[in-house]
């Protein structure tokens, strides 16, 4: 089984943009929806609608409530999520790709 959320949960996650540095996923669900176990690299999550959910990883569960427009850093992790609220979830994940170059890569090699 794949741990890529787009592969294991295609009804909930979709790729809306991708290049060599980032992959941007849109996530939508309704109350009661639960994801299969999946993994995200280091990511920035932007909540587009208020929602309540439970996230479980490594035998630990955390209840999360976010308002529209909230932005959160999400460290690389494997987890399962469940919409425990009364409203649909809608968010965007900007997943950072490992080995993405910094400013020096963007400028090219040092000419010295």
Image (cartoon, helix red, strand yellow):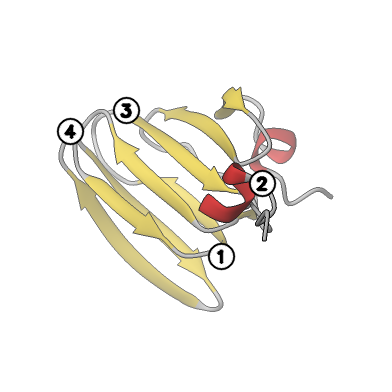
Residue at the limit of the structure toward the bottom, as seen here: 59
Residue 29: percent from left, percent from top? 43, 29
Residue 66 placement (x, y as % from top left): 20, 46
As helix, strand or loop, the secondary structure at mark 3 comes to loop
Q: 43 above or below 27? A: below
Q: Which residue is mark 1?
A: 77
* Residue at x-position 63% and y-position 50%: 105
Q: Are marks 2 and 4 in contact (CB under 8 Å)?
A: no
**Of the image marks 4 and 1, the number of the one nearer the N terminus:** 4
- The residue pinned by badge 4 equals 68
Mark whose residue sits in front, 2 or 1? 2
- Give the side of residue 48 with respect to residue 112, left or right: left
Residue that appears at 33% across and 49% down: 53
Q: Residue at x 67, y 61 (%)?
A: 112
Give the residue pinned by disc 2.
Answer: 108
Dot 3 corresponds to which residue? 88
Q: Are marks 3 and 1 in contact (CB under 8 Å)?
A: no
Q: Secondary structure at mark 1?
A: strand
Judged from this view, the residue extending furthest toward the top is 16
Closer to viewer: mark 3 or mark 1: 1
User: Label 2, label 1: how many angstroms apart (C-alpha)?
Assistant: 32 Å
Residue, far front: 112
Is residue 4 at all visible to an observer of this figure?
A: yes
Instruction: Please say if the residues under marks 4 and 1 sit with CB atoms less than 8 Å apart.
Output: no
Mark earlier in primary sequence (3, 2): 3
Is tag 3's residue or tag 1's residue first in the polypeptide sequence?
A: 1
């Amino acid at each position: 089984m794949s741990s890529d959320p787009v592969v294991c949960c295609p009804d909930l996650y979709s790729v809306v943009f991708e290049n060599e540095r980032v992959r941007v996923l849109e996530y939508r669900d309704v109350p009661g929806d639960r994801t299969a176990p999946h993994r995200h690299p280091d990511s920035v999550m932007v909540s587009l609608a208020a929602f309540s959910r439970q996230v479980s990883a490594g035998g630990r569960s955390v209840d999360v409530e976010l308002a529209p427009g909230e932005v959160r850093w999400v460290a690389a992790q494997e987890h399962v999520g469940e919409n425990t609220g009364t409203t649909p979830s809608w968010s965007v994940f900007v997943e950072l790709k490992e080995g993405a170059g910094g400013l020096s890569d963007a400028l090219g090699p040092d000419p010295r």
